[in-house]
Amino acid sequence: MMDRQDIDQLAQRLVSLVPTGLAQAHQDLRTNFGDVLAQGLRRLDLVTREEFEVQSQLLARTRAKVEVLEKRIAELEAGVHG
């Protein structure tokens, strides 16, 4: 998930897009952009890359076990019906 520093950097980039004639509003916009971004990201319920990788590895191991079990069931069924 993005930390506060990442959100602040993104807010700063958004503020940099505001025309220079509105320089007085830059700090207010930066604060508001940061708050809006932080709230939006919290609602997304994102996971970290590390959490994603752990779950991907767990899924891969589970798939491998399911394939082994499916093969074993097929062998047992063939023995019963054969």
Image: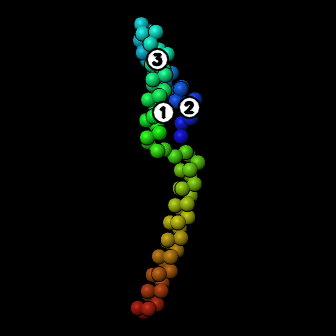
Q: How many marks?
A: 3
Callout 1 environment at 10 Å: few (<14), some (14 to 19), or many (20+)?
some
> What amino acid is labelled 1 in the image?
Ala
- Which of the labelled discs sits on residue 10, or is there none? none
Callout 3 environment at 10 Å: few (<14), some (14 to 19), or many (20+)?
few
| Whether residue 63 is situated above or below residue 28 in the rendered picture | below
At x 52%, y 74%, the residue is: 68
- Is residue 8 shown to the viewer in this render? yes
- Is residue 15 shown to the viewer in this render? no
Give the image location of residue 33, x and y in percent.
45, 25
Give the CA separation, mark 2 to mark 3.
17 Å
At x 44%, y 29%, the residue is: 36
| Whether residue 9 is situated above or below residue 50 in the rendered picture | above
**Which mark is first along the chain, 3 or 1?**
3
* Label 1 sits on residue: 38
* Label 2 sits on residue: 4
Give the image location of residue 53, x and y in percent.
56, 51
> What amino acid is labelled 3 in the image?
Asp
**Which mark is first along the chain, 3 or 2?**
2
> What amino acid is labelled 2 in the image?
Arg
At x 55%, y 45%, the residue is: 48
